[in-house]
Image (tube, rainbow, N blue to C red):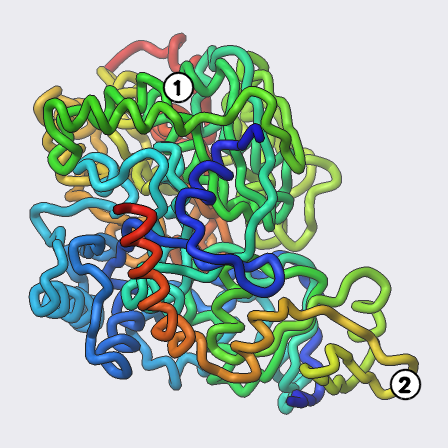
Amino acid sequence: MIVEGKLFPLDRANVDTDQIIPTRYLGAVDAQGLGAYCFGGLPGVDALYAAHPDATVVVARENFGAGSSREHAVWALQSRGFKAVIAPSFARIFEENAYNNGFVLATVPGDAIERVFAAPFARIDIVNESIALQSGAPISFTLDPLRKEFLLGGGFLRYMASQIETVRAWEASARG
Amino acid sequence: MAQTLFEKVWNAHLIRELPGLNALIFIDRAVLYELLGPPAIELIEGDFEGALYDAARVIAVNDHVAPAKDTSTAQLALQLRTWAKKRGVRLYDVGNNGICHVLVPERGHVMPGSTLVCSDSHTCTIGAFASCAFGVGSTALAGALLSSAVVVARPKVMRITVRGRLQNDATAKDLALAVVAQLGFKGATGYVLEYAGDGIAALSMDERMTLCNMAIEAGATTGMCPVDETTIAYLRGREFAPRADEFERAAAHWRNFVADEDATYDAELHIDAASLVPTVTWGTNPGESSPLSGNVPADADAAALEYMGLEPGVKLRDIELDQAFIGSCTNARIGDLRAAAAVLVGRKVRIPTIVTPGSISVKRQAEAEGLHDVFQDAGALWTHSSCGACPGLSTGVLAPQMRCISSSNRNFPGRMGTGGRVHLASPVVVAASAVMGRIASPDELESLVTA
C-alpha cells in the first residue's frame, strides 16, 4: 500500500480536532460533505488552501488531532481528499480513529520532519514503513503491528465482530 | 507483585494480549450521546443487524444540545431516541437528562474497578471512581457495542502525588490546570494519570471528577483516583448502585481498587496543593495558563496571543470580558454551583452570565437549596442542564473576538463559537469575574459594598 501526494505544510503544533472540524458541523453535514469544512477552525487556512490547491498529504507539528474524540476529524480530512498526515506526534483518540478508517498517519520525529516540511512531495510506503521524498535518504517510521493490519485490511469492526465468542467465553469464566 | 491501581483494573478486564502492546479489554459499560453516537449506531445497524453484546451495559443520553436547537440536532436526538427504544437501551432524555459524565456517576452507573468507554474525550471524568474510563471514536464505540470489548494499546502509568490542602480560593480546577500546565498539552500522551496522596483524599467526588476531567487536556488516556470512603459514601443509595447487603459486599470488593504500596510507575509528578493559587488560561490550549494575579508570559506562543487578542506582559486582571459561563462536565456539579453562588450572593454581575447545571438532578438540588435565586438575583441566566455553551452549539455561543471566562475545559480556537476567545478558570473565579466585568479573584470582591 502506497500513499503519495503533494504536501500541505501546516507549520503548527497542537492542531486540535475543533480546528480540523468545528463542532457545529458534527451531525449537521454528511461525512462525505465534511471536506468543505476541513480545517474550518484553523486561523489562516484559506491562504494555505490557495497556495497548495492539490496537496493531499498533510505535514504538521506535534500533537496533531488533540482534543475531542470526534471521528469526523478523520472523515473531514478524507472527504477533503487528504490521504495521510505526517507529524512528530498524534493524540491517542485521533490516531485510533485514523487507523479504524484506513487513514494513514506517519509519526516522524525531530530532524526528519524538517526534511518533510522542506519537500514538495512525499511517497509513503505503508508495508515497508518508509517515506520517500524527492531527494535524500528515505525516512523510516514505525506502525503498530495490529493497527497496521487494520489499515491494510480495512476491517476493524469485522475484527471486533470476530472476537465476540472469545469475549463471551472470557466473561463466562472470569465473571462466573 | 505490587500493582498500580490501573494495573488492577486492566488485569481484571484483560481478555487477551494482542500483537504489539495491544490488548483486548472487556468493557463493563458503553455510553453514547446524540452528537457522536449516531455514527456508531449506523455502523452496527448497517453492517451487523444492530446486534448489541448486552443492551443492559449501554447508556444513551441526549446531552450536548438538549433540547435540540434546530432541525439537524433534533434529527440526531431522534435517531438516538428511536434506536435506544428499538434496542432496549436505557435512555436519559430531555427532562430526565444531564451531561453524560455528570449523570452516569450520580445515577450509580459506574462502579469502582470497572471499565467504561464513551464517544467523548471527557469520559476520563469517571476515572474519579477508580474506574478505567476513556474516550473512543465512533467506530471503536461501535466495536464496544458489538463485542463489549475494545482494542487498546497498554498505556504507561504516571503517578501524580498531591500533598496538602487547597486553600485561599484555589480549587480542584486550579489543581487540574496546574497538572496540565506542568505536563503540557501533550505531555501525558500514552499515559494514564494515577492520582495519589492526602491532597486527593481530601477532595470530594465532585472535585475529583473536575480533576480527572482534564486528564485528556494533557493528552492522557484517562485519570484515576483510588477508592476510599468518600467514593463509597458517594455511591451509597444511588439509583443503580447495589442495595443494602449487596452494597456492603460490593464496597468490600471496591476497597481493593487502590494502588499497592510498593507499586512502581513509569513516571512521577509531585504537586503541593497548598501552593496552588487561582489560575486562568491566556492561550488556546488548556496548558497555557498563569496565576490570576500574574501576567501573560513574555515567551507566550505568538499565534495563541494573536488569536486571543493579547500581548505578552498584559496583566490578567486587566483583561475585560464580554461573557461568563459556569457549566460543563468540568464544573457544573452541585459543589461547583454552591461555590459560585457563595461568591455571587448579594452581588450583581456586570456582563451576561450563564449558569448551566450539569444535570437535572444537580438543577433540582440547586433549586432546593435556593442557589437558582442567588444566580438570578445576581442577574445571571439560570438554564436547563446540557453541555450548553462549552462546545459552542447553543445557549451562549460567542461571536468573533467576544471574550468569555468559562468554567469549562477547552479554550481551543473557535471552541465556543467562531473567533470567540475563551479563558478557563474555576467557578469561583468565573463568578468573581462576572461581578467585576474583568478577570478577577473572589478576594477582590471583599472590599466591594454588597448590592
Mark 2, residues whose alpha carbon is within 10 Å: few (<14), some, or many (≥20)?
few
* Residue that mark 2 sits on: A135
- The residues tagged by marks 1 and 2 sit, at their Cα atoms, a distance apart of 57 Å
Q: Chain of mark 2?
A: A
Mark 1, residues whose alpha carbon is within 10 Å: few (<14), some, or many (≥20)?
some
Left or right of B361 on screen, residue B226:
right
| Disc 1 to disc 2: CB gap under 8 Å | no
Residue A31 position by quadrant: bottom left
Front residue of B279 and A142: A142
Task: Give the secondary structure at mark 1.
Answer: loop
In the picture, the disc for residue B371 is none
Instruction: Name the residue type under label 1.
Output: Leu
In the picture, the disc for residue B203 is 1
Residue occupying the far right of the picture: A136
Left or right of B57 on screen, residue B13:
right
**In this rendering, does residue B341 appear at all?**
yes
Which quadrant holds the N terminus of chain B? top right
Task: Give the secondary structure at mark 2.
Answer: loop
Instruction: Name the residue type under label 2.
Output: Ser
Which quadrant holds the C terminus of chain B? top left
Q: Is residue B237 above or below residue B169?
A: below
